[in-house]
Amino acid sequence: MLAFIEQNIATLIISLILILIVTAIIVNMVKNKKKGKSSCGCGCSGCSMYKNCHKN
């Protein structure tokens, strides 16, 4: 097991960094969704998909 880790340490580190980055992005998107912010970055007033995002 130790030999496997030693041979693949670079791959393991890069994979861990990518997992952390993706997790941070998802957490940020969930927080923004709970705050009612749009994920597209523009206002909802001119968006044709407004009714699909805001079902009131």
Image: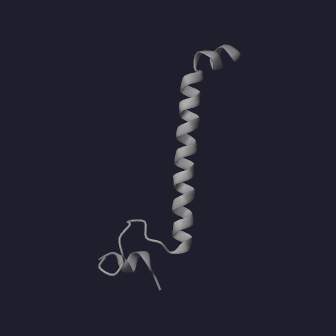
Which quarter of the picture shows residue 50? Answer: bottom left
Q: Is residue 43 left or right of residue 3?
A: left
Q: Which corner quadrant holds the N terminus?
A: top right
Q: How many marks?
A: 0
- Asked whether 37 or 49 is in front, the reply is 37
Q: Residue furthest right?
A: 2
Question: Which percent across, then down, holds residue 20?
Answer: 58, 43
Residue at 55% across, 63% down: 30
Residue at 55% across, 73% down: 35
Q: How is the image coloured?
A: one colour
Residue at 38% across, 80% down: 51
Question: Which percent across, then down, holds residue 49?
Answer: 33, 75
Q: Where 11 sits versus 29, above or below?
A: above
Question: Which percent across, then down, holds residue 42?
Answer: 35, 70
Q: Residue furthest bottom?
A: 56
- Asked whether 56 or 26 is in front, the reply is 26
Q: Where 26 sits versus 14, above or below?
A: below
